Amino acid sequence: MSKIVVLRMGHRPQRDKRVTTHVALVARAFGADGIILADVHDRGLERSVRKVVELWGGPFFIRSGEPWRIVIEDWHSSGGLIIHLTMYGLPIDEVLPNLEGKDLLLVVGAEKMPSELFDLADFNVAIGSQPHSEVAALAVLLDKIFKGSELRKEFKKWKLRIIPKNKGKKVEKKL
Amino acid sequence: MSKIVVLRMGHRPQRDKRVTTHVALVARAFGADGIILADVHDRGLERSVRKVVELWGGPFFIRSGEPWRIVIEDWHSSGGLIIHLTMYGLPIDEVLPNLEGKDLLLVVGAEKMPSELFDLADFNVAIGSQPHSEVAALAVLLDKIFKGSELRKEFKKWKLRIIPKNKGKKVEKKL
């Protein structure tokens, strides 16, 4: 089973709390194994994501404060691919066949990314060549990688689980 | 050609500026016709989204301050469907066949949604029954409705357009 990890660049703890939380929750909900916040430590965000894992299940890891170049070098040296999500990249449909069965580090940015990253990445990939959202780009990429099967993923050690229904809310609890 | 409009609920101009901007940009980039921010006026957000349309093309509209019940009633009375995105709803794969060729009002929320909305919606739809992000949910829903073709959409009257490439950035300008 190949590994998929998200590397979140340029996180600013105060300003990006909500958007980075969305990125982390999308990574978990859409089947990634974990997320690394590059360069800066953010214990508060780590805690709130771990709280979600504790309640809704895992496995899913979050780490922060690791230098981005080292994360990328390590990933490369264990044979994985670096996929940089950017509106300037190649259309996802062109790139997708190259990703199958590979360990993938999905790099999602802040507004300004080091230009070096474009060179270090094996693929620079666009989810549409339009300005939108790294949260959306990550979700759609993972949905395409897993061909929609991630939406039926069963998490382990959950305390809360939703029973889908068309009206109202139904939640199973193991607390 | 059927119409697709996003209704953003519970927008708080200060606190939600970034997330609502992501929602609006996703609506545009993934092929919706426009977005309505329910109940509250936010001229600043309207302006910044219109600026994106002016630069990157359209058509795409944004309006704000319209009471949500009236938007929903109007949509219903012209024969369209109300699709409420919620983690408690039915899996998208089950609902998708019912949406084909219909005018769709896609309702995306804030954390707390009026419970009435679950009843007013024709379908309450989950993009995975896990906590994540309304930005992601909207993107994946639109991607499934358009079967990926939205990522090749050509916008009109653009001043900026990206020429996809694997390394670096290439932007065509008509300024």
Image: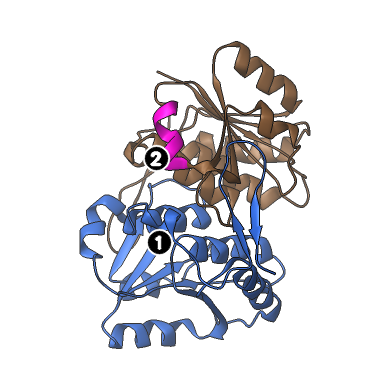
Chain colours: A brown, B blue
On the rendered image, what quadrant is the C terminus of chain A found in? Answer: top left
Q: Which residue is mark 2?
A: A144
**Closer-to-camera residue (B41/A156):** B41
Residue A86 at x, y percent in the picture: 60, 44
Residue at image x 72%, y 40%? A44
Residue B172 numbered tag: none
A42 with respect to B123 (left or right):
right
Q: Secondary structure at mark 1?
A: strand
- Whether A97 is among the magenta residues is yes
Residue at image x 67%, y 40%? B168
The part of the chain drawn in magenta is A92-99
Residue at image x 62%, y 65%? B21
On the rendered image, what quadrant is the N terminus of chain A found in? Answer: top left
Bin the neighbour count of mark 2 within 10 Å (Cα to Cα): few under 14, some 14-19, many 20 and up.
some
* Amino acid type of the residue tagged 1 in the rendering: Leu
**Closer-to-camera residue (A23/B88):** A23
Residue B85 numbered tag: 1
